[in-house]
Amino acid sequence: DNYAFRLLEKNFDLVLAKVPKDAKVAVVSVVGAFRTGKSFLLTLMLRYLRYKTQFEDGGKSSHDWLRYLGDKIYEGNVNSGMEENEQSFQWRGGRQRMTTGISIWSEPFMLAPDLAVLILDTQGLFDNETTMGLTSCIFGLSTLMSSYQIYNVANRIQEDNLQQLALFTEYGRMAVDAQMLQAKEDEEITKSNTDETDEQIKAPFQRLEFLVRDWTEFDESMSDEQMVDAMEEYLNEVLAERTANDLAFTREQIRTCFSDISCWLLPHPGFQVTKLSYDGTIDMIEPLFLRGVSGLMHRVFSDLEPKIINGHFLGAKELGNFVKAYVGMFADGARFPQATTMLEATATANNRNAKEKALDIYNNIMDRACGTHRETTFL
């Protein structure tokens, strides 16, 4: 079935198994229209994370991370004449799409002893082969999975970008609102849970970053601070109150769905980079793009928050249970699942996580009481 989602559970479990047991997990995803540079951006993201997890400065004070593997970006480059390698998501120039479905990079990155980050690549939206139902499912599923969602748009944030975002996230908001109401009624959420805040309860999703590609209003004379100020001003203009009911409703939907919304404006990398013959030479990339992408990486990964559901920071096992439940409800990718279906899937994952947590606590207590670290087995 071309419209069905199927989780490669064995591969997914292998990735989660690499996360330390006591670590929490953040999930960064990139979504947006096809052929807008998502996979190339993710390749740079992986290079940055490899540098950041190996060197003390973490890419803060220089652009050394761009060249520490050499003067070419060879990872994932499948342009003409390039040798295929598996060190990144694949990318290339041209008009043919690269990614199908949703892919998770095989290695988690440890940004701190207690924080791992997973990177998601998603199929490009709004191509000539993907139905609107499947597009909605890809966007919705990646949003449910992510703690930091990057919405990749071309040139500027247009009204249809906002309307699509509001539509895709509304379904998830309805399900999470219903789940929160049920949790409160069952007294599952109490003030003693130190992981939660009122803001996290109100907003079903966490961080949204509008990433505007090929921005034309920056030049070399501008400082980084001036560019960031311009980004904030632009986002305020886009999300400002409107008198027309439909425009005002769209913006209110987006504000209530995410606890934190920001914007990054990224200049064009240069037309040499978009050619099928591009061999990854960094010197061919426009300097303004390199400045911008360095700033973006620092923003995303300098203060990253773990995935939160019901006010609780998730570890690898808990995240895995939620993802499996969510993929199951999106199995029929031809249409978006009902809010009640999402509620049931979330409740199922919650119950599984509670059961596994209780079992872990019991095992630890028994180990201490009996003076053994043997694994307890239940029939």
Image (spheres, helix red, strand yellow):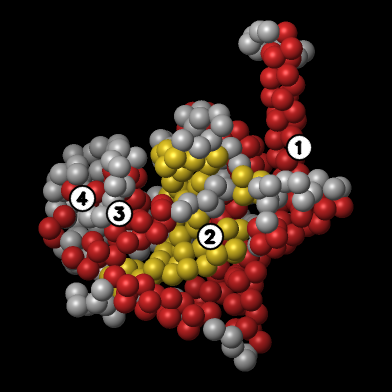
Residue at the disc numbered 2 = 207
Q: Please report whichever mark, 2 or 4, sits nearer to the chain's N-terminal start.
A: 4
Distance of mark 3 from mark 2, alpha carbons? Answer: 21 Å
- Between circles 3 and 2, the one closer to the viewer is 3
In what quadrant of the picture does the N terminus appear? top right
- Which image quarter: residue 22? top right
Report the side of 255 relative to 209 (left or right). right
Tell me the kind of residue under disc 2.
Answer: Arg
**Residue 328: percent from the left, percent from the top?**
65, 42
> Are circles 4 and 1 on residues that touch, CB within 8 Å?
no
Tell me the kind of residue under disc 1.
Answer: Asn
Residue at the disc numbered 4 = 64
Q: Nearer the viewer, residue 327 or 14?
A: 14
Q: Please report whichever mark, 4 or 1, sits nearer to the chain's N-terminal start.
A: 4
**Residue 183: percent from the left, percent from the top?**
80, 50
- Which image quarter: residue 198? bottom right
Position of 199 relative to 113 (above/below) = below
The reply to whether residue 127 is visible in this rendering is: no
Residue at the disc numbered 1 = 351
